[in-house]
C-alpha cells in the first residue's frame, strides 16, 4: 500500500480497545470495500526505570497501524495532552440506507448524542464521523435550486440521514 497521507488518532489510554472496535465495525459492515485489519501494534516498553513517557504508559500502545476498507490509519496512547475535536471527522460514504443505518447505529453506541446532527456523530472515543449517503450528493447539487434547497432543509432537521425522506423532500412530497 502506498498511501502518502495517513491519519493519526491520539487516545488518552484506550487506543487498543478503539482500534479493535473500529476494525470490527468495518469487518462486519453490510458491504466490504477493502480490507479492514490491524497491521501491527507496538507498545511502550515495561521495566525501564524512570521512563520519559511516565510510569502509567508502560505496556500501552505507542503505535497501532490499522486499515479500514483499505485506508491506513495510525493511532497511539499519548496520555491526556490532546483530545479529539469535531473539527476533523472521518467520512463514510454509503450507497444504501442499510449501510447508513449500520454505521450510524454502530458508531453512535456510547457516543455523545449532542454531537449528532446532519449525519455527523461522535463515537464513544470522542472521534467525529460523517455517515454520508452518496445519493444525497445528486439531490443537493441539482441545478434545480428549489428542489436542492428542499432536500437541504430536510437534511438540516435530521440526525441520522434518511435517503427516502431526502428524496421525498427533493420531489416536493
Image (cartoon, rainbow, N blue to C red):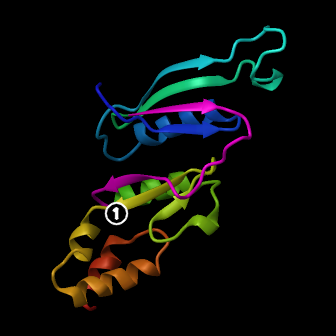
The quarter of the rendered structure image containing the C terminus is bottom left
Rendered residue at 83%/9% (across/down):
49
Q: On the picture, is 112 further left or further right than 70?
A: right
Q: On the picture, is 122 further left or further right than 34?
A: right
Secondary element at tag 1:
helix
Which residue is at the front of the view, 145 or 118? 145
| Residue 138: image location, x then y, percent | 21, 70
| Residue 165: image location, x then y, percent | 34, 79
**Residue 90 within the magenta-colored segment of the rendering:** yes
Q: On the picture, is 106 further left or further right than 37?
A: right
Residue under circle 1?
A: 97
Residue 62, image quadrant? top right
**Residue 29 within the magenta-colored segment of the rendering:** no
What are the residue bounds of the magenta stretch?
72-97
Rendered residue at 30%/35% (across/down):
34
| Residue 123: image location, x then y, percent | 58, 52
Residue 27, image quadrant? top left
Q: Measured along the vertical axis of the image, is residue 131 above or below residue 33? A: below
Which residue is at the front of the view, 114 or 98? 114
Q: On the picture, is 60 further left or further right than 30?
A: right
Please tell me how many numbered marks the rendered image carries. 1
Residue 12, image quadrant? top right
**Crowdedness near tag 1: few (<14), some (14–19) or many (≥20) residues, C-alpha within 10 Å:** some
Regarding residue 171, the answer to whether it shows in the image is no
Which residue is at the front of the view, 156 or 89? 89
Amino acid at each position: 500500500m502506498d498511501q502518502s497521507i495517513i491519519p493519526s488518532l491520539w487516545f488518552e489510554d484506550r487506543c487498543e480497545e478503539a482500534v479493535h472496535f473500529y476494525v470490527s465495525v468495518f469487518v462486519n459492515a453490510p458491504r466490504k470495500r477493502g480490507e479492514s485489519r490491524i497491521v501491527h501494534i507496538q507498545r511502550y516498553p515495561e521495566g525501564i526505570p524512570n521512563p520519559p513517557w511516565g510510569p502509567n504508559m508502560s505496556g500501552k500502545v505507542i503505535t497501532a497501524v490499522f486499515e479500514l476498507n483499505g485506508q491506513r490509519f495510525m493511532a497511539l496512547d499519548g496520555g491526556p495532552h490532546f483530545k479529539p475535536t469535531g473539527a476533523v471527522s472521518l467520512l463514510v460514504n454509503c450507497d444504501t440506507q442499510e449501510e447508513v443505518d449500520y454505521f450510524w447505529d454502530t458508531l453512535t453506541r456510547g457516543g455523545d448524542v449532542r454531537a449528532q446532527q446532519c449525519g455527523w456523530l461522535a463515537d464513544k472515543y470522542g472521534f467525529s464521523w460523517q455517515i454520508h449517503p452518496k445519493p444525497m450528493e445528486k439531490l443537493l447539487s441539482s441545478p434545480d435550486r428549489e428542489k436542492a434547497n428542499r432536500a437541504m432543509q430536510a437534511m438540516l432537521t435530521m440526525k441520522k440521514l434518511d435517503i427516502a425522506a431526502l428524496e421525498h423532500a427533493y420531489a416536493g412530497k
